[in-house]
Image: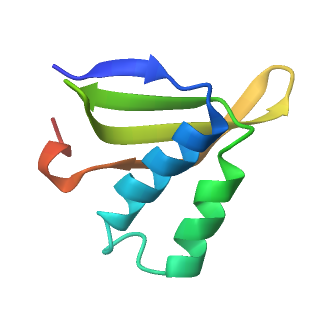
Amino acid sequence: MPNIVEISSPEEKSRICLAVLRALPEWFGVASAVLGYASSVKPLPFFAAREGTRNIGLIALKRNTPSAMEIHVMGVLKDYQRQ
């Protein structure tokens, strides 16, 4: 069962985002967009799904109002989707 952890380090957020999105070229095949996401997640609330020490997914949230957030970007490695 994956463990969900909040990530606070901007550099770690960016690194996880790059790794997961680059592993999903069917959905994130534009390199400049992947780099844009990796940069844009740094200030956002960010959670990683981990199996052991392996990052298998991510979600970054964008606050629109004090009471509403939206998903900015999310991804789950192919082997772990639909579980």
Q: Position of residue 32 (x, y in %)?
A: 59, 79
In the displayed structure image, the side of residue 63 where residue 60 appears, left or right: left
- Could you tell me which residue is drawn at 19 percent across and 55 percent down? 78
**Residue farthest to the right?**
65
Please tell me whether residue 11 is drawn above or below residue 2 in the rendered image.
Answer: below
Q: Where is residue 58 in the image (x, y as percent from the top left)?
A: 43, 40
Report the coloring of the rendering. rainbow
How many numbered badges does the structure rendering display?
A: 0
In the displayed structure image, the side of residue 78 where residue 27 appears, left or right: right
Q: Where is residue 75 in the image (x, y as percent from the top left)?
A: 39, 50
The residue lying toward the viewer, choosing from 7 and 59, is: 7
Please tell me whether residue 73 is drawn above or below residue 22 in the rendered image.
Answer: above
The residue lying toward the viewer, choosing from 69 and 25, is: 25
In the displayed structure image, the side of residue 80 where residue 76 appears, left or right: right
- Could you tell me which residue is drawn at 67 percent across and 56 percent down? 39
Q: Quadrant of the N terminus?
A: top left
- Could you tell me which residue is drawn at 70 percent across and 36 percent down? 44
- Could you tell me which residue is drawn at 76 percent across and 27 percent down? 68
**Residue 19 picture quarter:** bottom left
The residue lying toward the viewer, choosing from 15 and 65, is: 15
Q: In which quarter of the image is the C terminus?
A: top left
